[in-house]
Amino acid sequence: MFLRGFFAGAGAAMTLSMIITMAAFAFTDPFAAEERGTAAAAAAAPPTARAILEVEAKPTGRLALTVRATIADRRYRPVAGARPKVTLDMIQMPQAHRTAPTAMDPVAGSPGTYEAKIVAPMAGDFDVAVALTTPLPGEAHTRITMPSRAAKSS
Ligand SMILES: [Cu+2]
């Protein structure tokens, strides 16, 4: 009698604990689970864990331009310690004189912001690509037109 009650009780308890576990899975924040992670979990991070980038480029002189990128994680927290690189590729002449990737430097006092001053190979329209691999992978593009003569400063 006691034993039967015990097993029935154990069975009910087990079922209840399974329901709680399943509910916990259903309501656990998947980002939190990922960030809690160990090195193994980080290595297995899903490909959706990508950086969010905003890229701006502006001409600063004849063929010279400044590229600025802000890099954040998926929760819009600035990503410090990244090593973004910028590459120019001419839109009218794809791959013809794509620049070597140039490292971008962190901007002092502005966490998650990186900048590089580069020189376009010729006047024209360029795709400006900023990419990083650590601590998160990410890539973003903008476009810039380098005028055939330097714009007058106003
Ligand atoms: Cu060209």
Image: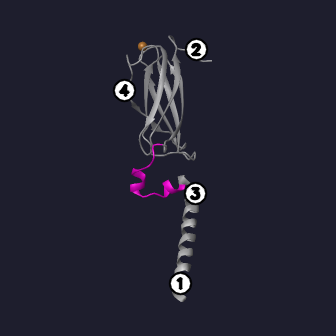
Mark carried by residue 4: 1
What's the amino acid at mark 4?
Answer: Ala
Q: Nearer the viewer, residue 88 or 140?
A: 140
* Closer to us: 26 or 73: 26
Q: Does the CB distance between marks 2 and 4 fall below 8 Å?
A: no
Q: Secondary structure at mark 1?
A: helix
Question: x, y percentage for residue 23?
Answer: 59, 62
Q: CA distance from mark 2 to mark 4?
A: 29 Å
- Determine crowd level at label 1: few under 14, some 14-19, many 20+ residues with C-alpha closer than 10 A: few
Q: Is residue 73 left or right of residue 82?
A: right
Q: Amino acid at mark 3?
A: Ala
Q: Residue furthest right?
A: 154
The residue beneath circle 3 is 26
* Residue 100, numbered label: 4
The earlier-in-sequence mark between 1 and 3 is: 1
The reply to whether dot 1 and dot 2 touch (C-beta < 8 Å) is no
Give how far apart the Cα atoms at labels 3 and 4 are. Answer: 46 Å
Residue plotted at (54% across, 89% down): 2
